Image: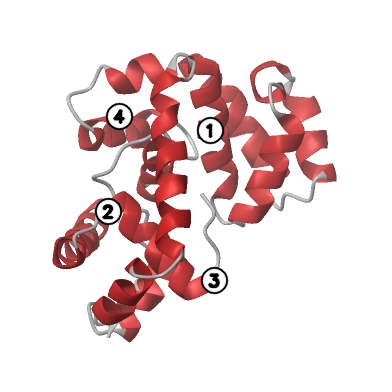
Amino acid sequence: MLIKKIEELKNSEIKNIIDKRIQEFKSFKNKSNEEWFKELCFCILTANFTAEGGIKIQKEIGDGFLTLSREELEEKLKNLGHRFYRKRAEYIVLARKFKNIKDIVESFENEKIAREFLVRNIKGIGYKEASHFLRNVGYDDIAIIDRHILRELYENNYIDEIPKTLNRKKYLKIENILRDIGEEVDLKLSELDLYIWYLRTGKVLK
């Protein structure tokens, strides 16, 4: 059923919207360390929060991710409605030691190795957030496994249950299931995520 729904979407106007969004991600290859860092901050913010909320905050704060004090960031995040404004401000300030994040990521052989570095070294970044960041800056072969993706896989009998937490082993196992689905419908993981997200939410975000 999931395969059929995705194939139908590939033959609809949604394909053009998703293709355009993927090209936007690819354009990050030409952007600066500062732009990559702001995208990393967006992914730190979206953990246990909404993508829409993260997008709104990212637009409002902009270069402030690079310059505001922790106290100023806390105040901004609080006023913009983030649930975990103290922790997220702390994580963003700590992440500033990796302001050259583009150079760091591009030094690795592939996105999977880069993801391991991000998860090990940046507080507030787990496999989902690291995958989200890497997809948003133009990488293809990693999956963003969130509640929407898990629910779709569960309802279509690809997984037996929706795990309460995802450790590395579970994450990579489910990522391989998604990779198999992607091969069946001729989509990269970066594209497949947007198709499934649309199926669950009716939206194409980032």
Quick check: marks 3 and 4 in contact, CB under 8 Å? no
The amino acid type found where label 4 is placed reads Phe
**What label sits on residue 39 in the rendered view?**
1
**What label sits on residue 117 in the rendered view?**
4
Binning the other alpha carbons within 10 Å of mark 1 as few (below 14), some (14 to 19) or many (20 upward) gives: many
Residue occupying the point 70% across, 16% down: 67
Task: Establish if 65 lies above or below 42.
Answer: above
Q: Which residue is labeled 3 in the image?
A: 202
Observer-side mark, 1 or 3, equals 3
Observer-side mark, 4 or 2, equals 2
Q: Earlier in the sequence, mark 4 or mark 1?
A: 1
Does residue 146 appear anywhere in the picture? no
How far is disc 3 from disc 4 in space, using C-alphas?
33 Å
The amino acid type found where label 2 is placed reads Leu
Name the image quarter holding the N terminus: bottom left
Callout 4: helix, strand or loop? helix
Callout 3: helix, strand or loop? loop
Q: Position of residue 149 (x, y in %)?
A: 38, 68
Q: Position of residue 18 (x, y in %)?
A: 43, 55
